[in-house]
Image (tube, rainbow, N blue to C red):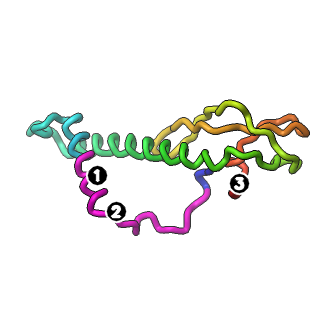
Amino acid sequence: MGKESQNDQDVNAYEFSPSIRGKVEELVALLADEGFGVDGPPRETDFATIEAFGHQAGRAVARAFDEHLTQRHAKHFQQAEACPTCGAPGEVADAAKERPLQTCDGTIPLSELAQHCPTCDRDFFPSACGVKT
């Protein structure tokens, strides 16, 4: 789940469905109303202010999107995995641990089950160890 791994798919080439594009337009309208009111930015508002708000809103959406997908992705790592140090079977922790994950849009919480290696007496996160499921 590391930032350094890149998917082969060109994400810029992805086309959203008309339904999703409509939902995005609804979200944009809601965010614009939140930032500037239903009448939009006042006449004296410069473009830099509009652009800055757009980037702030975009980063908030990106962080929410990243958090949502990392939570879904973490579900793939709920089974015991081999310790990345010694290869012994790990034991899944009873409760999820939360750790900060730095994205290009800010920090998000990453909550996933840690695993413990009784041989090495260490905890590890399979998603951070390059474990393939």
Q: CA distance from mark 2 to mark 1?
A: 10 Å
Discs 1, 3 touching: Cβ within 8 Å: no
Residue count near mark 2 (Cα–Cα under 10 Å), binned few <14, some 14–19, many ≥20: few
Three-letter code, disc 1: Val
Is residue 17 among the parts visible in the rendering? yes
Q: Helix, strand, or loop for circle 3?
A: loop
Discs 2, 1 touching: Cβ within 8 Å: yes
For marks 3 and 2, the one nearer the N-term is 2
Q: CA distance from mark 3 to mark 2?
A: 30 Å
For marks 2 and 1, the one nearer the N-term is 2
Discs 3, 2 touching: Cβ within 8 Å: no
- Expressed as whole percent of the image width and height from the top left, the position of residue 88 reads 88, 47
Q: CA distance from mark 1 to mark 3?
A: 33 Å
Q: Name the residue at 10% across, 38% down.
A: 39
Three-letter code, disc 2: Phe
Q: Helix, strand, or loop for circle 2?
A: loop
The residue at which mark 1 appears reads as 24
Q: Helix, strand, or loop for circle 1?
A: helix
The residue at which mark 3 appears reads as 130
The mark found on residue 58 in the picture is none
Q: Is residue 67 left or right of residue 128?
A: left
Q: Name the residue at 82% across, 36% down.
A: 122
- Expressed as whole percent of the image width and height from the top left, the position of residue 70 reads 54, 46
Is residue 44 among the parts visible in the rendering? no
Three-letter code, disc 3: Gly
Residue count near mark 1 (Cα–Cα under 10 Å), binned few <14, some 14–19, many ≥20: few
Q: Quadrant of residue 120?
A: top right
In the depicted structure, whether residue 5 falls above or below residue 74: below
The residue at which mark 2 appears reads as 16
The residue segment tinted magenta is 5-27
Q: Is residue 126 left or right of residue 73?
A: right
